[in-house]
Image (cartoon, rainbow, N blue to C red):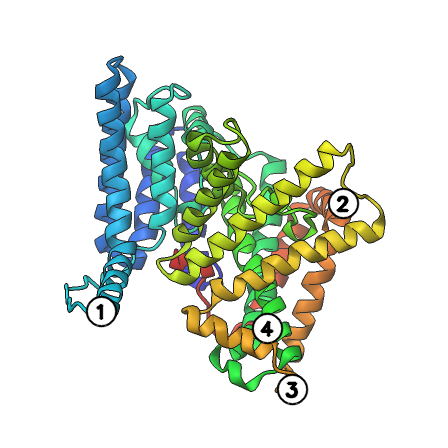
Amino acid sequence: MLFPSVAFLIFFSGVLLADLALRPWARWRKAFLLAASYGFYGFWDWRFLGLILLSTAVDFWVGGRLGGCDDAPRRRRLVGLSLVVNLGLLGLFKYFDFFVGSAVELLDGLGFEASPPLLRLILPVGISFYTFQTLSYTLDVAARRLEPCRSPLDFALFVAFFPQLVAGPIVRARDFLPQLAENPRPTRAGISLGLYDLASGLFKKVVIADLIGAGLVDPLHQDPGRFGTAGALLGVYGYAFQLYGDFAGYSQIAIGCARLLGFRLPVNFRAPYLARTMGDFWRRWHISLSTWLRDYLYVPLGGSRRGRSRTRRNLLITMVLGGLWHGAGWNFLLWGTIHGLALVLSQGRRERRLAAGRCLPNGWFSRLLQRLVVFHVWALSLVFFRAPDLDGALQVFSSLARPSGALQHSILAFGAFALTLALHLGSERWKPRVVRAFVRLAPELQGAALLLLLGLMSLLMSEARPFVYFQF
């Protein structure tokens, strides 16, 4: 059930009406939202509901036992159980075939014959997101940053809340469980902001991401040999903006839907292509994942507390595993390694500036140059992210080095590309004003604006395209 679809419009309208009727009765309201969330997920494939239920049951039980346990070895065993179950399921469905296949290729290269069976399991949609979500609860309870949840209904709804279940933002239990305890209701301002987020997210997905993807990106990756430098660059730049529009659009739709129900989800993007360093970029892009990796991987590894060499090692390990989180393939490992090295180099430059008593240059030309460098590191690394394998990525790089070749000519895609570039560059100035102006509109005008957007979507969209992050 895709967000930009008639099926979701009908589903969400029914949820809103039922939620409105059930708000005076908190327990019944939460039970209904949980049932709706399971129905939403079961719409993709009902067979995988058992995985969510298993993760939910294990982590609720582990959290409860951790709350009353002071015995250190037993606490470690409880945390280990949560890690084994959650990461075991993730590894089985997402990584088993990759690692077994890679081992077979290595043995073949060494002259040994091996043919272990591959499982060829279907990847459950959203498993990477809700696995990290449930793990954050267990790890926070184990670190005594959070009291165990005593309500199985609240905990199950935290894990399965449908707006962000499939592709985030990754929500922390310490942020969401207190909201469930309050039984929040949407305010007039919250409804306006929710409608704005819903409209803005749909616009980014359908009008920006899908048009750029179909007109600039897909042709390049379907046949890289046709294109030369100019056409390949358009495809590479186009994918950077397609991915932003697609994923930031999903996150904003999820945030908007939650706001219409009275709940708050964390912001996941803050104009990432205005970043001036790689560290700044990762504080703006997929914020809920980057902060998760920081808090539950980078810091436990030692963070920046044990000298420069270990800090750089920790950065590299974190980003390599972050790349692997995105997909089971050597291209994702290489993509993560590139960003790990980029962060290490960026931190090294920062340390040298501080040692010399110099700040980051702040003139307009310096800011422009810094942003261009960061954007190009990101955009070129995405060749590995978008390509199906390393060979496909190398073909795209070959096109970038080819002086002549075909050039895409989709007018709509060019228009969407130019529009998203202009909107992104001016977002820090114009977005707060637009949001304030939209909130001040009468509810009827806000609804009319959303209907106009839906009409535009119906004209532009020949078929619903899945969100990119559904594959993770």
| Mark positioned earlier in the residue sequence (2 or 4) | 4
Q: CA separation, marks 2 and 3?
A: 44 Å
Question: What amino acid does circle 2 point to?
Answer: Arg
Horizontally, residue 211 falls left or right of residue 157, namely right
Q: CA separation, marks 2 and 1?
A: 61 Å
The residue nearer to you, when weighing 91 against 182, is 91
Q: CA separation, marks 2 and 4?
A: 32 Å
Vertical arrangement, residue 333 with respect to residue 261, above or below? below
Vertical arrangement, residue 435 with respect to residue 175, above or below? below
Which mark, by number, is residue 235?
4
Q: Which residue is rendered at x = 68% and y = 62% of the image?
A: 420
Question: What amino acid does circle 4 point to?
Answer: Gly
Q: CA separation, marks 1 and 3?
A: 39 Å
Question: What amino acid does circle 1 point to?
Answer: Asp
Which of the image's four quarters has the C terminus?
A: bottom left
Rendered image quadrant of residue 373: bottom right
State yes or no: discs 4 and 1 in contact (Cβ < 8 Å). no
| Labels 2, 3: front one | 3
| Labels 2, 4: front one | 4
| Mark positioned earlier in the residue sequence (3 or 4) | 4
- Badge 3 element: loop
Q: Which residue is mark 2?
A: 433
| Labels 4, 1: front one | 1
Vertical arrangement, residue 338 with respect to residue 71, above or below? below
